[in-house]
Image: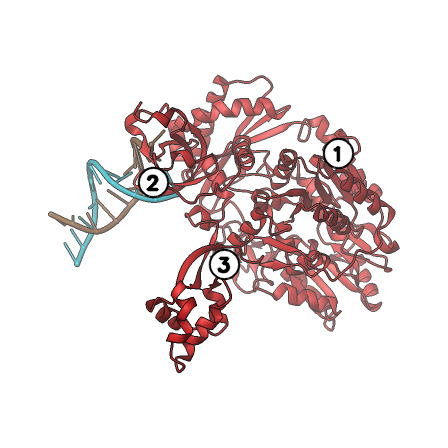
Chain colours: A red, B cyan, C brown
Amino acid sequence: MQNPAAGATRVILVVAIDTPLRRVFDYRAPAAWAGEVQPGHRVWVPFGKRRVVGVVTECRDRSSVPEGKLRFAFERVEAEPTFDAGFLELLRWSADYYRHPVGEVIAAALPAALRQGAPIAVEETRWRLTVIGKEQGLEKVPARARQMRAAIEALTDVADRSAEDLVAAGISRESLRKLEDRGYVEHFTAETTPPASNEGLGTSRSPALNEAQQTAVDRIRGSLGSFVTWLLHGITGSGKTEVYLNAIATVLERGEQALVLVPEIALTPQSITRFRERFDVPFAIMHSGLSDGERLAAWRDARSGTARIVIGTRSAVFVPLARPGLIVVDEEHDSSFKQQEGFRYSARDLAIVRGQRHGIPVVLGSATPSLESLERAQRQAGSLLSLPHRAADAKPPTLTLVDLRKHGESQGISTPTLLAMRRHLDAGRQVLLFLNRRGYAPVLFCPSCGWAARCQRCDANLTVHRRSALLCHHCGAEQDMITRCPTCSSDVKPVGQGTERIEETLEAIFPKVPLARIDRDSMRRKGELEATLAQVDRNEIRILVGTQMLTKGHHFPNVTLVVVLNADQGLFSTDFRASERLAQTIVQVAGRAGRAEQPGEVLIQTEYPDHPLLSLLLRGGYDAFAAGALTERQQAHWPPYSRLALLRAEASHRAEPLKFLQAALAAAHRHAVKGVQLLGPAPAPMERRAGRHRAQLLLHAPTHAPLQRLLSSWILELESLPEGRKVRWSIDVDPAELF
DNA sequence: AGCACGCCGACT
DNA sequence: GTCGGCGTGCTC
């Protein structure tokens, strides 16, 4: 043994590196700092020809890597470990659960700046007087050198001041540098704690809570300090946010932090205002629109404990917290909590895992809970918190089906709908029409030969857009509008309705009524959505036409009529979750109507008024629907009564994905685990998308354990399949969308 | 993912 | 004669 101390120092570092390889890499720790490195430290290491930042996941005595292959790590990024052991364990668990390369999982949890080796600590230049400067600075600097004298005065009677502070006080860097040359002042670098980037206002007070709210708050409060998954099921307008706010107030009193996860589109300045107005504490806000610098600042505030409330979208579930006290997942059913590419994690599910590891409660809130969460609440007796009433005695809206087969319909709008619109508009109210299809028309069709405009790169029709002609909604491809059929030269015509066409139709029917269309196309520019919503609030707009965008977050107190123009898209889908999503959308959009004292009316246009899902929803609301849907899932052995994983593959050559999946299927038989069924492989329903052919193989098991057992050995083999080299493949554990 | 190596085609 | 196409192989 060369070094007598080597027995005590673990010299092998197991390092996770941001690479798609499902492996970690061993390095030798240089003797200079081998004793000062621990799991969680970021280190610079040589990796192939590159120099990269990795995260130490383990320190060991020995490595199974041949001596000749081992390389020395270069250096630690900083003295402090980036993650503590518990958080690192959460990341490793997530990598393991989702079967994703641990290096990429850890990278996903780091702000870009930290991935590139930036230090967590903020350093600043500070200035102070030297001993000579203190004793004789003012005597030696001539009176006319006013700048320099001012600098000395500014540093007298204080230990030191930051350069930034001095500049703000009118001291020039130039004069400081001159004084430094003469030996009167000196500068040094110090770590600093910058103030939190977002401060609360604390101007509003809690309104009186109703009984249900108070019960919910009390029970969450009573659970602080221990792990419970609460499902806060509150109908729209029942005051869920007020429950969160009151629970958070107690969390803050305990000196702990609250993490609030919200859907992507819901994180608007207004939604944050509600929180900021209640609490006079530092906040950290995390969303995809932040710059690298802002993201790092928010991350740092959360990790240091400076930020007491952290509000963020999906990725915020991976923000370290110094003193976690509570996790809230608002609108927990929202699909944006599931990442749909790369590391396909569910932030809602990981929030629960995180709560368990921290030993703190997790509150899942929704007016339309996911069936997974409802089933969990049924299993965990007493974990359901219901808010069954609207605040301020507002009446729930009445839902009515409009049978499109019976009633006349023109351009997607039926006669009963038109009559109802007139009635509500005449009464001075606002009307909201929901259609989950942007553009003018979903098809451009030739009536004489049956030709339809297709995307070159996808198995899909092109959508007609009024301005930019023909667009593919799946790959973004754009083509010029045509008026003649390319095969038979007859006139082609747009068929079906999109929001643009509804807008056009309504403008013709109600020429004097101000109307706004709210979808991704009309609200492209920053601030446009906020401006339009403000106009709606001022009653300057009377008719609103829009997509999903309308159903999230914003409340329209003067809207008394909501029309769901086409409820049929989700009724006959191959995806077993389509009906759940449809019910959630209908209930969410219905919830926009009739706040306060005005009762709301909701019309649902459908060709299938007898569909069992719609009747359940109409007769018994979301609860009845959910109960029915859960029974169906149980009988069909679908989640939440079973667990799924999906192996997807895509390639530009048509046959490759299926070839790979067949090889994968054969491999799975060699790893067969009891209870795991394999379904497929099958081409995706839209086989070609953006020029790539897609196929998938579904794994089905009664619980997660056997699935996990199969996946762990199977994936190793998949990596060495020659068929896998020609395709891009990925594993999706707990897939949200089957196709 | 990067990055390099390697072996065949149209160009300053 | 070289620049560059992307197949193949490797990363402690």
Q: Check disc 1 and report the residue beneath it.
A: A377
The subunit carrying tag 2 is A
| A383 up-or-down from A175: above or below | above
Q: Residue at x 78, y 39 (%)?
A: A222
Q: Judge if badges 3 and 1 mark residues of a common chain.
A: yes
Q: Residue furthest bottom?
A: A144
| Three-letter code, disc 2 | Phe
The subunit carrying tag 1 is A
- Mark 3 vs mark 1: which is more N-terminal? 1
- Quarter of the figure with residue A73: top left
| Three-letter code, disc 1 | Ala
Tag nearer the camera, 3 or 2: 2
**Disc 3 from disc 1: Cα separation:** 60 Å
Relative horizontal placement of residue C12, taking residue A433 as reference (left or right)? left
Q: Check disc 2 and report the residue beneath it.
A: A74
Q: Position of residue A459 (x, y in %)?
A: 51, 44
Tag nearer the camera, 3 or 1: 1
Q: Quadrant of the C terminus of chain A?
A: top right
The subunit carrying tag 3 is A
Q: Is residue A202 visible?
A: yes
Crowding near pointer 1: few (<14 within 10 Å), some, many (20+)? some
Q: Position of residue A156 (x, y in %)?
A: 48, 68
Q: Residue at x 54, y 39 (%)?
A: A344
Q: Check disc 3 and report the residue beneath it.
A: A489
Q: Judge if badges 3 and 2 mark residues of a common chain.
A: yes
Depth check: give the residue in front, A120 or A15: A120
**Disc 3 from disc 2: Cα separation:** 69 Å
| A353 up-or-down from A178: above or below | above
- Mark 3 vs mark 2: which is more N-terminal? 2
